[in-house]
Image (cartoon, helix red, strand yellow):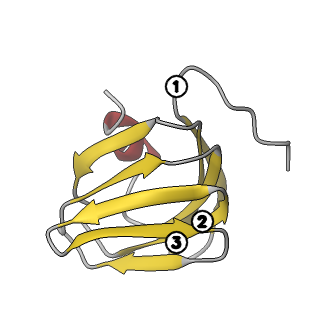
Amino acid sequence: MAQATYGATVQIQSLMETPTSKEIRIVMDTGQSMKEHTAPQAITIMVLQGEVRISSDEGEVMLEAGDMVYFAAKVPHALEALSPSVVRLSLAKSDSVSRVLGVLK
């Protein structure tokens, strides 16, 4: 796996597809964010490096490397990098990377 490169925009890379999931790497520099959005199926988010703020209807939580969070389908949530961060996003196989890219627009 290539070293994370922080750029002017959030970087999204497909890592792997399994029979049941899609694994995505999200690279965010300090202050970069993903606006509030929902996923059609349940997701898990794991911080691999850095620190991110995740907000939802239930409030905000700060996650550091090794921390994970789960969201059921259609739960609104947003992410903001508090430091240069690498996040692993696990999607249902039926979800799409293009939908994730659309969150950045």
Q: First in sequence: mark 3 or mark 2?
A: 3
Q: Is residue 76 left or right of residue 1?
A: left
Q: Which residue is mark 1?
A: 9
- Position in image of residue 25 (x %, y %): 62, 52
Quarter-wise, where is residue 8 in the image? Answer: top right
The extreme top residue here reads 8
Residue in front for this viewpoint, 30 or 44: 30
* Residue at screen point 49% across, 57% down: 52
Label 3: few (<14), some (14–19) or many (≥20) C-alpha neighbours in 10 Å: some
For the residues bearing labels 1 and 2, Cβ distance under 8 angstroms: no
* SS for callout 3: strand
Q: Amino acid at mark 2?
A: Val
For the residues bearing labels 3 and 2, Cβ distance under 8 angstroms: no
Q: Which residue is mark 3?
A: 21
* SS for callout 1: loop
Q: CA distance from mark 3 to mark 2?
A: 18 Å
Q: CA distance from mark 1 to mark 3?
A: 25 Å
Q: Which residue is mark 2?
A: 47
Q: Amino acid at mark 1?
A: Thr
Residue 47, can we see it?
A: yes
Q: Is residue 64 left or right of residue 61?
A: right
Residue in front for this viewpoint, 67 or 37: 67
The extreme right residue here reads 2
* Residue at screen point 22% across, 58% down: 38
* Residue at screen point 18% across, 75% down: 58
- Position in image of residue 67 (x %, y %): 57, 77
- Position in image of residue 105 (x %, y %): 31, 27
Q: Amino acid at mark 3?
A: Ser
Q: CA distance from mark 1 to mark 2?
A: 18 Å
Q: First in sequence: mark 1 or mark 3?
A: 1
* SS for callout 2: strand
Label 1: few (<14), some (14–19) or many (≥20) C-alpha neighbours in 10 Å: few
